Image: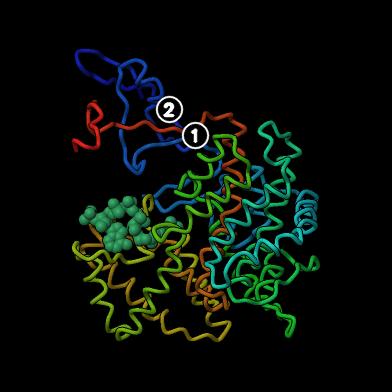
Amino acid sequence: MSDFAELHYDGNVYKIPVVEGSEKEKALDISNLRASSGLITIDPGFKNTGSTTSAITFLDGEEGILRYRGYPIEQLAEKSTFLEVSYLIIYGALPTTEQLSTWKSEITYHTLIHEDFKRILEGFPSNSHPMGVLSSLVTSLTAFYPESLDPNRSADQVRISIIRLLAKMPTLAAWSFKNEIGHPTVYPNNNLDYTSNFLRMMFSTPAEEYEIDPVVTDALDKLLILHAEHEQNCSTSTVRIVGSSHASLYSSVSAGINALWGPLHGGANQAVIEMLEAIKADGGPGAVDKYLAKAKDKDDPFRLMGFGHRVYKNFDPRARIIKKAADNVLEKLGVNDPVLEIAKKLEEAALNDPYFVERKLYPNVDFYSGIIYRALGIPTNMFTVMFAMGRLPGWIAQWMEMRTNNEPIGRPRQVYTGETVRDYVDISKR
Ligand code: ACO
């Protein structure tokens, strides 16, 4: 294999180095192309552009492979826990018994948030979407921990910021929900594990204690693992690009939460359930063909939510695990959700339809996750918050990797297509 490619342009030949990753993926390194040739590359949506090299996640969209730090997602979902996977993603290796125990107890110790957060919450109208509230609360952490703003922060400062963020995220997420429904906030209980603690803060009230059901806790923990990291997606790229200006971890992650919120990204899990509900109200499984036709109609903005993916062009391995888990959880909890039947019918119809086959559109992670969240009692507006809680270790690891590698500030170029130079016209002459 040649270690460079040649670009022939305007009578000149430019040698472009080829870089290769550990899984033999190859890329052209064009970082010096403009300096040598005056040319830049253009690639809207970065469909064919690598923004970085990264040692965190390997993803092969054609083969449906997803590995965190080399470990297959299927094994981690079956055998690990969210906190162990978080350690793996952030620090690059599975923790020893002692490391895991320290990690868990440090995170448990920092779950409480400053009482002033209540005053911030009071400023939001109840009914506020919890994603907007969560991103604001995460940014607010900079006010409580101003040392996190120091661009020359020590490794110890970064470590404590990471612990605080992971520890406080379930508290902030649950409080965003309590604000929405107008209930009093519930303090963390450090006798509980990470996921149970979150569920209790969500669902217990001064009038009634929430009973932890291990089926619910295990299912949620698995969902968090499946969402924990996914290389350079929209929200992660946002975290890296915000952090590249040396902004703090908290403000970078808050930006990631906002990027995740959109319906083409993490907000799809809420959009899927809303779509399935609309189909149910419009006739149930019998209306599936109508919605399929709408999704194929180029004059109709409707898209089949939870279908399609920028990189998975065969299947999304997370969707397979979640579909199986959905059946299992619904059966164990004795829930009979009619939208599950609609989802299965829709999936089957789409997978046999040439429009979806030709475009390699398959169910993604969000197609079945909402059905499980619903069975676990999580309200629809909180689905994307659940995704944000899951994705947190990925955002942290990517932010750290970018800063440790001392990557330059993210600043794409453009090809200008506006007016060429013209003289200012006095207002009386326009
Ligand atoms: N329904 C109908 N048609 C679709 C869908 C869909 N869900 N997704 C893609 N297409 C069509 C497009 O119209 C386009 O058709 P064309 O070639 O005839 O113009 C073709 O498939 C390619 O689609 P693009 O939008 O160019 O693909 P891109 O990689 O830019 O988008 C995306 C990927 C945003 C995920 C898209 O498939 C989509 O909008 N899906 C629905 C929203 C969704 O589920 N998002 C969650 C993704 S997973 C995650 O972020 C966690």
Q: Pick whichever, 187 or 160, lies toward us.
A: 187
Residue 178 seen anywhere in this rendered image of the structure: yes
Residue 187 placement: quadrant? bottom right
Q: What residue type is labelled 1?
A: Thr
Residue 303 position, x and y percent, is 30, 64
Q: Residues within 10 Å of mark 2 (few under 14, many from 20)?
A: some
Check residue 19 in the rendering and tell me which mark sits there, or answer none.
Answer: 2
x and y percentages locating residue 49 in the rendered image: 37, 37
User: As drawn, is 306 to the left or to the right of 374?
Assistant: left
Q: Are marks 2 and 1 in contact (CB under 8 Å)?
A: yes
Residue 37: x %, y % from top left: 30, 17
- Disc 2 marks a residue whose amino acid type is Val
The residue sitting at 51% across, 64% down in the picture is 384
Q: Quadrant of ligand 1?
A: bottom left
In the depicted view, which residue is nearer to us: 280 or 335? 280
For label 1, the crowd category at 10 Å Cα-Cα, with few meaning under 14, some 14 to 19 and many 20 or more, is few
Q: Residue placed farthest to the front in the image?
A: 428
Disc 2 vs disc 1: which is toward the camera?
Answer: 1
Q: Is residue 293 above or below residue 413?
A: below
Residue beneath label 1, please?
A: 53
In which quadrant of the rendered image does the C terminus lie? top left
Residue 180 placement: quadrant: bottom right
Towards the viewer: 75 or 367 = 367
Q: Is residue 359 visible in the rendered structure shown here?
A: no
Is disc 1 placed on a helix, strand or loop?
Answer: loop
Tell whether 202 sits left or right of 330.
right
- For the residue pair 169 and 88, the one nearer the viewer reads as 169
